[in-house]
Image (spheres, rainbow, N blue to C red):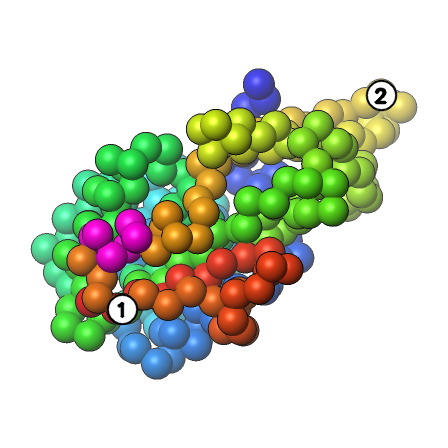
Amino acid sequence: MSPDLYDDPEFYDLLHAGYRDDLAFYRGLADDHGGPVLELGAGSGRVTLALAQAGHAVLAVEPSPAMRARGAARLAAAGCGERVTWIDADMRALDLEATVPLAIAPFHALMHLPTLDDQDAALRAVNRHLGPGGAFATDVFVPRFGAAGTAGAAGAAGAPGAVRAERLGDGDLFVWQTDDAANQVVVTEHRWDRVADDGGLLRRRASLRQRYFHRFELERALRAAGFARVRTFGGFGRAPVTQTATSWVFLAHV
Protein backbone atom coordinates (compact mmCIF):
# COMPACT_ATOMS: atom_id res chain seq x y z
CA MET A 1 0.00 0.00 0.00
CA SER A 2 1.12 3.55 -0.66
CA PRO A 3 2.15 5.96 2.12
CA ASP A 4 -0.68 7.50 4.14
CA LEU A 5 -2.08 10.64 2.53
CA TYR A 6 -2.00 12.51 5.85
CA ASP A 7 1.77 12.13 5.98
CA ASP A 8 2.01 14.26 2.83
CA PRO A 9 -0.01 17.44 3.52
CA GLU A 10 1.32 19.20 0.41
CA PHE A 11 -0.10 16.43 -1.79
CA TYR A 12 -3.31 16.41 0.29
CA ASP A 13 -3.82 20.12 -0.34
CA LEU A 14 -3.12 19.72 -4.04
CA LEU A 15 -5.74 16.99 -4.32
CA HIS A 16 -8.40 19.09 -2.58
CA ALA A 17 -7.41 22.58 -3.71
CA GLY A 18 -10.66 23.16 -5.59
CA TYR A 19 -13.07 21.78 -3.00
CA ARG A 20 -15.27 24.49 -1.47
CA ASP A 21 -18.68 22.82 -1.24
CA ASP A 22 -18.82 22.72 2.56
CA LEU A 23 -17.37 26.09 3.52
CA ALA A 24 -20.56 28.18 3.43
CA PHE A 25 -22.40 25.58 5.50
CA TYR A 26 -19.86 25.42 8.33
CA ARG A 27 -19.24 29.15 8.26
CA GLY A 28 -22.99 29.76 8.50
CA LEU A 29 -23.27 27.49 11.52
CA ALA A 30 -20.46 29.41 13.22
CA ASP A 31 -22.22 32.69 12.45
CA ASP A 32 -25.43 31.33 13.99
CA HIS A 33 -23.96 29.73 17.12
CA GLY A 34 -20.88 31.82 17.85
CA GLY A 35 -17.54 30.56 19.06
CA PRO A 36 -15.21 29.22 19.89
CA VAL A 37 -15.82 26.49 17.34
CA LEU A 38 -14.43 23.05 18.16
CA GLU A 39 -13.19 21.52 14.92
CA LEU A 40 -12.38 17.80 14.96
CA GLY A 41 -9.97 16.59 12.29
CA ALA A 42 -8.86 20.08 11.27
CA GLY A 43 -6.25 18.65 8.90
CA SER A 44 -4.28 21.31 7.04
CA GLY A 45 -6.75 24.04 7.96
CA ARG A 46 -8.98 24.32 4.90
CA VAL A 47 -12.22 24.79 6.91
CA THR A 48 -10.30 26.33 9.81
CA LEU A 49 -9.13 29.16 7.59
CA ALA A 50 -12.65 29.92 6.36
CA LEU A 51 -13.92 30.14 9.94
CA ALA A 52 -11.00 32.28 11.13
CA GLN A 53 -11.32 34.65 8.18
CA ALA A 54 -14.98 35.10 9.15
CA GLY A 55 -13.80 36.26 12.58
CA HIS A 56 -14.41 33.08 14.58
CA ALA A 57 -12.11 31.58 17.19
CA VAL A 58 -11.36 27.92 16.47
CA LEU A 59 -10.09 25.08 18.65
CA ALA A 60 -8.55 22.95 15.92
CA VAL A 61 -8.02 19.33 16.94
CA GLU A 62 -5.62 17.44 14.66
CA PRO A 63 -3.45 14.44 15.69
CA SER A 64 -1.12 14.52 12.66
CA PRO A 65 1.99 16.68 13.29
CA ALA A 66 2.53 17.21 9.56
CA MET A 67 -1.04 18.37 9.00
CA ARG A 68 -0.98 20.63 12.08
CA ALA A 69 2.22 22.29 10.90
CA ARG A 70 0.78 22.83 7.43
CA GLY A 71 -2.42 24.27 8.90
CA ALA A 72 -0.64 26.61 11.28
CA ALA A 73 1.51 27.92 8.41
CA ARG A 74 -1.59 28.45 6.27
CA LEU A 75 -3.38 30.44 8.99
CA ALA A 76 -0.26 32.49 9.75
CA ALA A 77 0.21 33.34 6.08
CA ALA A 78 -3.40 34.54 5.92
CA GLY A 79 -2.86 36.77 8.95
CA CYS A 80 -5.42 35.12 11.20
CA GLY A 81 -3.36 32.54 13.07
CA GLU A 82 -4.10 34.23 16.39
CA ARG A 83 -7.74 33.12 16.14
CA VAL A 84 -6.83 29.43 16.08
CA THR A 85 -5.57 27.18 18.86
CA TRP A 86 -4.09 23.97 17.45
CA ILE A 87 -4.59 20.94 19.71
CA ASP A 88 -2.67 17.69 19.44
CA ALA A 89 -5.34 15.25 20.59
CA ASP A 90 -7.37 12.22 19.63
CA MET A 91 -11.07 12.99 19.24
CA ARG A 92 -11.92 9.73 21.01
CA ALA A 93 -10.31 10.89 24.26
CA LEU A 94 -10.78 14.63 24.03
CA ASP A 95 -10.95 16.46 27.36
CA LEU A 96 -10.58 20.23 27.13
CA GLU A 97 -12.31 20.97 30.45
CA ALA A 98 -14.44 23.53 28.63
CA THR A 99 -17.65 23.71 26.63
CA VAL A 100 -18.37 25.32 23.28
CA PRO A 101 -21.55 26.31 21.43
CA LEU A 102 -20.59 24.48 18.23
CA ALA A 103 -18.51 21.45 17.30
CA ILE A 104 -17.88 20.28 13.76
CA ALA A 105 -16.20 17.28 12.13
CA PRO A 106 -16.00 18.33 8.48
CA PHE A 107 -14.92 16.54 5.32
CA HIS A 108 -15.62 12.98 6.45
CA ALA A 109 -13.58 13.28 9.67
CA LEU A 110 -15.66 10.64 11.47
CA MET A 111 -14.75 8.13 8.76
CA HIS A 112 -11.32 7.78 10.35
CA LEU A 113 -12.88 5.99 13.33
CA PRO A 114 -12.65 2.31 12.38
CA THR A 115 -14.60 0.58 15.18
CA LEU A 116 -17.93 1.04 16.93
CA ASP A 117 -16.10 1.71 20.20
CA ASP A 118 -14.05 4.43 18.48
CA GLN A 119 -17.15 6.05 17.04
CA ASP A 120 -19.09 5.93 20.32
CA ALA A 121 -16.16 7.37 22.28
CA ALA A 122 -15.70 10.26 19.85
CA LEU A 123 -19.38 11.17 19.74
CA ARG A 124 -19.69 11.05 23.53
CA ALA A 125 -16.63 13.30 23.79
CA VAL A 126 -18.25 15.79 21.42
CA ASN A 127 -21.44 15.78 23.46
CA ARG A 128 -19.50 16.45 26.69
CA HIS A 129 -17.91 19.54 25.16
CA LEU A 130 -21.17 21.19 24.09
CA GLY A 131 -22.92 23.72 26.28
CA PRO A 132 -26.73 23.97 26.65
CA GLY A 133 -28.31 24.22 23.22
CA GLY A 134 -25.00 23.39 21.57
CA ALA A 135 -24.82 21.89 18.09
CA PHE A 136 -22.66 19.35 16.32
CA ALA A 137 -22.37 19.06 12.54
CA THR A 138 -20.57 16.56 10.36
CA ASP A 139 -20.71 15.16 6.84
CA VAL A 140 -19.91 11.82 5.21
CA PHE A 141 -20.07 10.68 1.63
CA VAL A 142 -22.84 8.37 0.43
CA PRO A 143 -21.20 4.94 -0.05
CA ARG A 144 -22.24 4.40 -3.64
CA PHE A 145 -19.49 2.56 -5.50
CA GLY A 146 -21.35 1.36 -8.59
CA ALA A 147 -20.34 2.25 -12.13
CA ALA A 148 -22.68 5.24 -12.14
CA GLY A 149 -21.93 6.29 -8.59
CA THR A 150 -19.39 8.39 -6.80
CA ALA A 151 -17.81 8.11 -3.40
CA GLY A 152 -16.29 11.12 -1.74
CA ALA A 153 -17.30 14.73 -2.02
CA ALA A 154 -14.09 15.66 -3.79
CA GLY A 155 -14.63 13.04 -6.47
CA ALA A 156 -13.68 9.39 -6.63
CA ALA A 157 -13.06 6.55 -9.00
CA GLY A 158 -16.60 5.18 -9.39
CA ALA A 159 -16.74 1.39 -9.60
CA PRO A 160 -14.19 -0.44 -7.41
CA GLY A 161 -11.06 -1.14 -9.40
CA ALA A 162 -11.87 1.40 -12.10
CA VAL A 163 -9.24 4.07 -12.60
CA ARG A 164 -10.18 7.73 -12.88
CA ALA A 165 -7.60 9.88 -14.66
CA GLU A 166 -7.40 13.65 -14.85
CA ARG A 167 -4.91 16.43 -15.34
CA LEU A 168 -3.73 17.92 -12.04
CA GLY A 169 -1.27 20.81 -12.05
CA ASP A 170 1.67 19.84 -14.21
CA GLY A 171 1.01 16.12 -13.97
CA ASP A 172 -1.51 13.33 -14.45
CA LEU A 173 -3.52 12.05 -11.50
CA PHE A 174 -4.80 8.48 -11.32
CA VAL A 175 -7.29 7.42 -8.61
CA TRP A 176 -8.80 4.02 -7.89
CA GLN A 177 -10.64 2.43 -4.99
CA THR A 178 -10.99 -0.91 -3.24
CA ASP A 179 -14.25 -1.45 -1.37
CA ASP A 180 -14.42 -3.99 1.46
CA ALA A 181 -18.21 -4.00 1.78
CA ALA A 182 -18.25 -6.60 4.56
CA ASN A 183 -16.31 -4.25 6.84
CA GLN A 184 -17.54 -0.95 5.30
CA VAL A 185 -13.98 0.10 4.47
CA VAL A 186 -12.86 1.81 1.29
CA VAL A 187 -9.23 2.45 0.39
CA THR A 188 -8.55 5.15 -2.18
CA GLU A 189 -5.21 5.11 -3.97
CA HIS A 190 -3.74 8.22 -5.58
CA ARG A 191 -0.87 8.31 -8.06
CA TRP A 192 0.42 11.56 -9.55
CA ASP A 193 2.90 11.34 -12.41
CA ARG A 194 4.96 14.22 -13.82
CA VAL A 195 7.82 14.57 -16.25
CA ALA A 196 11.10 15.76 -14.70
CA ASP A 197 13.38 18.31 -16.35
CA ASP A 198 15.66 15.49 -17.47
CA GLY A 199 12.74 13.61 -19.05
CA GLY A 200 12.41 11.09 -16.26
CA LEU A 201 9.23 10.20 -14.38
CA LEU A 202 8.37 11.80 -11.04
CA ARG A 203 5.75 9.79 -9.16
CA ARG A 204 3.91 10.68 -5.95
CA ARG A 205 1.69 8.10 -4.27
CA ALA A 206 -0.64 8.14 -1.30
CA SER A 207 -3.52 6.11 0.07
CA LEU A 208 -6.56 7.00 2.16
CA ARG A 209 -8.41 4.44 4.27
CA GLN A 210 -11.95 5.27 5.42
CA ARG A 211 -14.63 3.39 7.32
CA TYR A 212 -17.87 4.53 5.73
CA PHE A 213 -21.31 4.91 7.32
CA HIS A 214 -24.85 4.27 6.26
CA ARG A 215 -27.34 7.00 7.03
CA PHE A 216 -29.40 5.46 9.83
CA GLU A 217 -26.32 3.87 11.37
CA LEU A 218 -24.85 7.30 12.04
CA GLU A 219 -28.18 8.80 13.08
CA ARG A 220 -28.59 6.08 15.70
CA ALA A 221 -24.99 6.52 16.88
CA LEU A 222 -25.60 10.24 17.41
CA ARG A 223 -28.76 9.54 19.41
CA ALA A 224 -26.99 6.89 21.48
CA ALA A 225 -24.28 9.46 22.29
CA GLY A 226 -26.89 11.71 23.89
CA PHE A 227 -27.97 14.02 21.08
CA ALA A 228 -31.67 14.74 21.44
CA ARG A 229 -32.39 16.11 17.96
CA VAL A 230 -30.70 14.79 14.85
CA ARG A 231 -31.40 16.05 11.34
CA THR A 232 -29.97 14.66 8.11
CA PHE A 233 -29.69 16.59 4.85
CA GLY A 234 -28.91 15.50 1.33
CA GLY A 235 -26.14 18.05 0.91
CA PHE A 236 -24.75 21.28 2.30
CA GLY A 237 -27.71 23.29 1.06
CA ARG A 238 -29.87 21.45 3.66
CA ALA A 239 -32.00 19.84 0.97
CA PRO A 240 -33.94 16.67 1.86
CA VAL A 241 -32.17 13.35 1.45
CA THR A 242 -32.73 11.86 -2.00
CA GLN A 243 -31.47 8.82 -3.84
CA THR A 244 -29.11 10.99 -5.87
CA ALA A 245 -27.42 12.72 -2.93
CA THR A 246 -23.66 12.27 -2.83
CA SER A 247 -23.19 13.56 0.74
CA TRP A 248 -25.15 13.22 3.96
CA VAL A 249 -24.89 16.19 6.29
CA PHE A 250 -25.85 15.71 9.92
CA LEU A 251 -26.84 18.44 12.37
CA ALA A 252 -27.43 17.39 15.98
CA HIS A 253 -28.21 19.31 19.16
CA VAL A 254 -27.81 18.45 22.82
Q: Looking at this view, name the residue that lies furthest to the right.
A: 199
Foreground residue among 243 and 115: 243
Image quadrant occupied by the N terminus: top right
**For the magenta stretch, what is the residue range?**
220-225
Image-quadrant location for residue 229: bottom left
User: Mark 2 or mark 1, which is nearer the start of the sequence?
Assistant: 2
Looking at the image, residue 140 lies above or below residue 99: above
Q: How crowded is mark 1: few (under 14 residues within 10 Å), some or many (20 or more)?
A: few
Looking at the image, residue 198 lies above or below residue 130: above
The residue type indicated by label 2 comes to: Gly
Image quadrant occupied by the C terminus: bottom left
3D distance between C-alphas at marks 1 and 2: 57 Å
The residue type indicated by label 1 comes to: Arg
Q: Residue at x 29, y 77 (%)?
A: 34
Task: Give yes or no for residue 223 being in the magenta stretch.
Answer: yes
What mark, if any, has residue 200 been given in the picture?
2
Foreground residue among 46 and 28: 28
Q: Residue at x 81, y 44 (%)?
A: 167
